[in-house]
Amino acid sequence: MKHRLLFFAMLLPFVLHSCDRLAKYPGYKRAGHGIYFQLHTIGEDSLRAKPGDYITVKLAYLTLDDSVFFEGTRKLQVNPPAYEGAIDECFMMLSEEESATFIIKADLFFDITLQGELPSFMTTGDPMKVKVDMLDIQSAADYLKEKEAFLSWIEDFGDYEKVVLKQFIEEEKLDVDPLPSGIYYLNLRPGNGKKVAPGDTVTVDYEGRFLNGKFFDSTRKRHQPFQFVYGTEWQVIKGLEEAIGMMAEGEKSLFILPSELGFGNRGSSNNIIPPFTSLIFEVEILKVSSPGKI
């Protein structure tokens, strides 16, 4: 009897440790490689994303206490996981129309996947949440076939866009020349703070509209400034990346972006921005925080 009691006493710490691991993130299941997940919706198709597939996903990055610091819809190619617990493993757990929230290691995600700096409000070893809505999965062959057919159909649209943009600049009597990249940059209010640099956490308000004046997005109307780490992938379109990199804290400027610096010859994945469409962005830099500072 004494030996049995001794055995259970020795076993108890391991049982408690095991229970503690299961309860580490209440409501989440462990998937291996340090990934935890919570499935929100189940799709009808059992086919899951695999390396080489092109996926359209709605992404949200959150802190562990559910503070959102990035949201956006992206089309990207699934890669073989570059390390254990990579976000590609999360993508490969989902089929079309499924959504889930994953808990992954923030430092590996930013350092290896995004090849950028860890946000200033996080420290090495911190976990983070990534909410993924799997909107569409395409094989590489289907994606390339669709792209080839689409480009063939709209090959003349590029010249048309240049004519429309030229007419807009003339009608608005904008006395400004495009930068070498093609961006038109009009400063509305000078900044009085730190200039944006790679690795900085930048908080911005922006309004995006078409050349006809119609708005397609506005953080001001949503009362929700956009915060991201400057210089990392999947954050902003190429033109906004260049534009924000020319600004300083407190500055407010207007940018006109040709489509090659916006959503290109495919348009946006949510179909709001058509192919070969120039865009106007009014951007205000609310705050610039260097790594290690809040």
Image: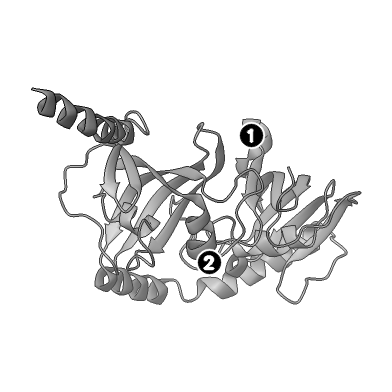
Q: Secondary structure at mark 2?
A: loop
> Which residue corresponds to mark 1?
224
Residue 72 visible (yes or no): yes
**Is residue 158 toward the left or the right of residue 187 in the image?**
left
Residue 198: where, in percent of width, then height?
Answer: 70, 62
The answer to which of marks 2 and 1 sits earlier in the sequence is 1
Q: Amino acid at mark 2?
A: Gly
Is residue 98 visible in the rendered image? The answer is: no
Q: Is residue 279 above or below residue 216?
A: below
Marks 2 & 1, CB-CB < 8 Å contact: no
Residue 24 falls in which quadrant of the image?
A: top left
The residue tagged 2 is 264
Q: Nearer the viewer, residue 209 or 165?
A: 209
Residue at 26 percent across and 69 percent down: it is 142
Could you classify mark 1 by the number of other residues whose Cα lies within 10 Å: few (under 14), some (14-19), or many (20 or more)?
Answer: few
The x and y percentages for residue 90 are 33, 52
Question: Observer-nearest residue: 54 or 60?
Answer: 60
Residue 164 in the image: above or below residue 282? below
Most foreground residue, 117 or 248 = 117
Residue occupying the point 52% across, 71% down:
157
- Callout 1: SS: loop
The Cα atoms of the two marked residues, 2 and 1, are separated by 26 Å
Residue found at the far left of this picture: 1
Q: The C terminus lies in which quarter of the figure?
A: top right
Task: Identify the residue at image location x=65%, y=32%.
Answer: 221
Q: Nearer the viewer, residue 121 or 169?
A: 121
Q: Residue 270 vs residue 34: left or right?
A: right
The disc labelled 1 sits on which kind of residue? Gln
* Residue 259 quadrant: bottom right
The dot on residue 251 is: none
Q: Position of residue 244 (x, y in %)?
A: 73, 57
